[in-house]
Image: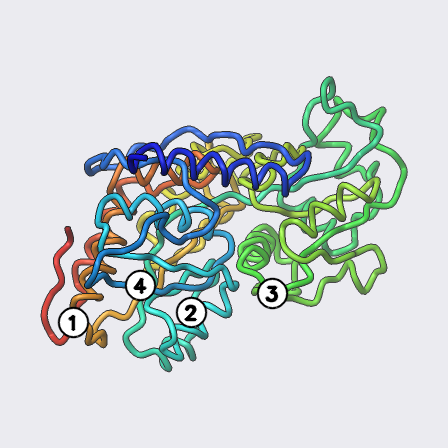
Amino acid sequence: MNKKLSVSMFVLIVAAMLLSACGTAATPTAAPVVPLTGNDSSVPTSAPASAATATALPAGSVTINGAGSTFQQPAMSQWAYGYSYVDPSVAINYQGTGSGAGKTAILNGTVDFAGSDSVLTDAEIASGKDLQMFPILAGAEVITYNLPELDATKDPALILDGNTLVGIYNATITKWNDPAILGLNPQLASKLPAKQITVVHRSDGSGTTEIFTNALTSFSSAWTAGHGTTVQWPVDKAGNGIGGKGNQGVAAAVQNTPDSLGYVEYAFAVSNKLPFAQMVNQAGQTVTATPDSVVSAMNDFANAFTPQLTAVIVNAKGAASWPIAGYTYTILHMTSMTDCVKAQKLVSFVNWFLTDAGAAKQATTIGFVSLPSAVQQQVLAKLGQVTCNGQALMLK
């Protein structure tokens, strides 16, 4: 059996296993491709769920280990598989252990790179010394809701704004027919019930919560619970908040609890066909979460990067911008790598998935948003400064 046929059969077998395991779960919906500069390597755009390559590696090959963000894990799995066709001598092994665990692993030297949706703290930067964050993809967060009074096939989507969302998570807006919600949804006024809102949040520490609480902080000074991977939720103290672990847990809690809402990642909502609210952004425009509205937000903050290449992309000013979005990052050592063969392979892999059109398609078809040119060029410039034993590495 030739390699092309065997790989195709392997992908079909894995797809069948995933469908069996997921039961009636919805098939992910493809998102529009955001073009990138660079060449399309024409690698396969389907990949097994595991980040491991499908074939045995040749002698003298290099294994590169990464860990961290579960949000970026689907993209890393796609890229690890696709890159095995670009450079068969490299095996990319990425484990979705969570952003915090990924940062700990690279600080402890147990992985070659880390993935994180959460930025390095000042203490982590000081401890890691030469660690650098590279934004690689972005994603939106959306508010999914369960209102039995609404017919998803006939009624328009719920509309919220930043102040109202803060009020809901602060437990100062507790009923679905609150005037603040009715004012944004006159077309639904007769259907929004006089029932308590059950407010769902993540129970685990997550970069998703960091992005969401960054948004709440930016929306209104009334939000005083702060921002981070975990916070003390006012709705819990008020008795109308519940927690769910991961996107799956939040979505399950919302789906199983009438008159509830919660925040989940856009790609997760789309792939599972969850209803989600539109938002009134800072420009006063009602917008929907789409790849284009996330790109607009990234462009709004293209000149706002810190030296660590981190940026908060919430509450953007653009008329077309989605107000709750964030980057997911790759974390690399800039100067302390000593295995220069592995270091070169790692930098080449990162350069590939940042610039190759085939790699971009692999990510965008599963709901991620690729970097616009204004952001991408800054990331590549910093990547070109990575050294090993004092020698510059090639972007190739």
> Residue shown at 13%/62% (left/top)?
393
List the single residue furthest toward the left. 391
Q: Position of residue 222 (x, y in %)?
A: 67, 57
Residue closest to the eye, 111 or 218: 111
The residue mark sitting in front, 2 or 1, is: 1
| Front disc: 4 or 2 | 4
Q: Amino acid at mark 4?
A: Ile
Q: Earlier in the sequence, mark 3 or mark 4?
A: 4
User: In the image, which is nearer the foreground, mark 1 or mark 3?
Assistant: 1
Amino acid type at image mark 2: Leu
| Lower sequence index among marks 1 and 4 | 4
User: Is 251 situated left or right of 266 in this image?
Assistant: right
Label 1: few (<14), some (14–19) or many (≥20) C-alpha neighbours in 10 Å = some
Report the residue marked by disc 3.
205
Q: Going by the image, does 211 lie left or right of 346?
A: right
Residue type marked 3: Gly
Q: Are marks 3 and 4 in contact (CB under 8 Å)?
A: no
Q: Which residue is mark 2?
A: 120
Residue 388's tag is: 1
Towards the viewer: 257 or 220: 257
Which callout, 1 or 3, points at the residue further toward the start of the chain? 3
Counting residues from the start of the chain, the first of labels 2 and 1 encountered is 2
Q: Residue at x 63, y 36 (%)?
A: 272
Q: Choose between 21 and 291: the one closer to the eye.
A: 21
Quadrant that contains the N terminus: top left
- Evaluate whether residue 36 shows in this view: yes
